């Protein structure tokens, strides 16, 4: 009898200890879904089981078919389409606490078509044939929910991720503390350009396709100010400019800045600067003349 023993050495702690499988689902096009762009505060993996269609990420569209994998990073707007002639079926994993990096992936490599756009990557025909097996076992565990099925699914997720990173030059970063630079910059630019409009958290949530409370928390962490306080600061800054460079009345300026009333503008201005709008204008003119 032949006997070959393979020793396992230097077992390291998992690189995905902070990652958590949120869900695993299957979808099949039956002519009844609507393609609506959306985003999530977590990553998603799409594995096409059969059929063909297209994937849209940040306005860029690319085709997908059987055995393709699409990775979507947190907060990347995306949607999928299926062709009626070849209905698409796929498995989706939602993964919290993980962001993929595509810096080491070339535009095309080893005959594999690769498409990257704003945090999404499309890989034509994945390398590891065991991927479907891992996904199928995870799906069966989730369906039957036997004892400790969550642990099985979580561990299989880690196996899947290891295989993907091993073969496809991907890398990952733990995203729990990742600052959402793209979304927060988008909000900041919008506030800077539209400060005179009636802007609410719902307005900003619609723009970024994020949950408004999550969005407000992320922006506050990014700028040190809540979106509403940043908007107020921006209006006060512009108010100073108008007081110094125009002869508009206080009432006119307050309306131009988007304040609901002159008294609210005066109150907010004094709280921010220590002076009323009239005092600020008078002092500026006196200094300029002197």
Image (cartoon, rainbow, N blue to C red):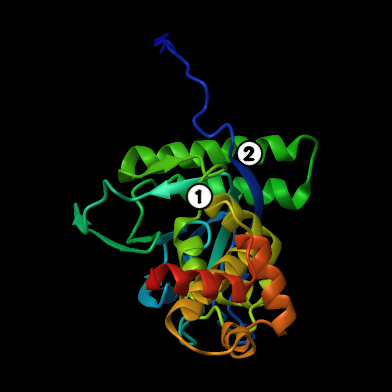
Q: Which mark is residue 55?
A: none
Query: Is the residue 88 above or below the residue 7 in the image?
Result: below
Q: Residue at x 57, y 59 (%)?
A: 92
Select label 1 or label 2 by which is in front.
1
Q: Is disc 2 placed on a helix, strand or loop? A: helix
Give the distance between the C-alpha atoms of the residues marked 1 and 2, in whole angstroms: 25 Å
Does the rendering let one see residue 25?
Answer: no
The residue closer to the viewer here, 4 or 48, is 48
Residue 257 drawn at (x, y percent): 58, 82
Report the front residue among 225 and 93: 225
Horizontal arrangement in the rendering, residue 232 relative to residue 110 (left or right): right
Q: Is residue 96 visible?
A: yes
Query: Left or right: where does residue 58 sit relative to residue 215?
Result: left
Give SS at disc 1. loop
Q: Would you name the residue on which mark 2 appears?
A: 154
Assign the C terminus to one quadrant of the image. bottom left
Q: Position of residue 53 (x, y in %)?
A: 43, 78
Q: Looking at the image, which residue is at 26% across and 46% down? A: 104
- The foreground one among 194 and 58 is 194
* Disc on the earlier residue, 1 or 2: 2
Q: Position of residue 254 (x, y in %)?
A: 62, 84
Q: Is residue 148 above or below residue 221?
A: above
Kindly identify the residue that appears in the image at 46 percent across and 71 percent down. Answer: 286
User: Residue at image x 21%, y 53%?
Assistant: 106
| Label 1, residues with CA under 10 Å away: few <14, some 14-19, many ≥20 | few
Query: Which residue in the protein does label 1 denote?
Result: 179
- Please state if 82 lies on the left or on the right of 258 as rendered: left
Q: Position of residue 44 (x, y in %)?
A: 54, 57
In the displayed structure, 58 sits above or below 119; it is: below
In the rendered image, the quadrant that contains the N terminus is: top left
């Amino acid at each position: 009898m032949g006997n070959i023993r393979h020793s396992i050495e230097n077992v390291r702690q998992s690189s995905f200890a902070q990652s958590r499988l949120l869900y695993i689902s299957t979808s099949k096009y039956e002519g009844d879904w609507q393609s609506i762009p959306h985003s999530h505060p977590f990553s998603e993996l799409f594995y096409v089981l059969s059929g063909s269609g297209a994937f849209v990420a940040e306005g860029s569209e690319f085709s997908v078919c059987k055995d393709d994998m699409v990775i979507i990073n947190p907060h990347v707007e995306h949607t999928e389409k299926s062709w009626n002639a070849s209905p698409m079926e796929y498995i989706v994993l939602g993964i919290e606490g993980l962001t993929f990096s595509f810096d080491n992936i070339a535009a095309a490599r080893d005959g594999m078509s690769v498409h990257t756009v704003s945090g999404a990557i499309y890989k034509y025909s994945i390398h590891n044939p065991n991927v479907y097996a891992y996904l199928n076992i995870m799906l069966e565990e989730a369906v039957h929910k036997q004892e400790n099925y969550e642990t099985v699914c979580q561990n299989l997720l880690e196996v899947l991720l290891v295989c993907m990173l091993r073969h496809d030059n991907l890398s990952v970063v733990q995203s729990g503390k990742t600052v959402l630079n793209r979304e927060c910059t988008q909000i900041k630019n919008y506030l800077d350009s539209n400060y005179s409009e009636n802007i609410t958290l719902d307005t900003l949530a619609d723009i970024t396709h994020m949950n408004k409370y999550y969005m407000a928390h992320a922006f506050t962490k990014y700028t040190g100010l809540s979106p509403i306080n940043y908007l107020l600061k921006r209006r006060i800054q512009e108010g100073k400019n108008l007081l110094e460079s125009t002869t508009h009345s206080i009432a006119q300026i307050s309306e131009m800045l988007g304040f609901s009333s002159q008294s609210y503008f005066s109150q907010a201005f004094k709280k921010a600067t220590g002076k009323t709008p009239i005092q600020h204008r008078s002092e500026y003119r006196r200094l300029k003349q002197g």
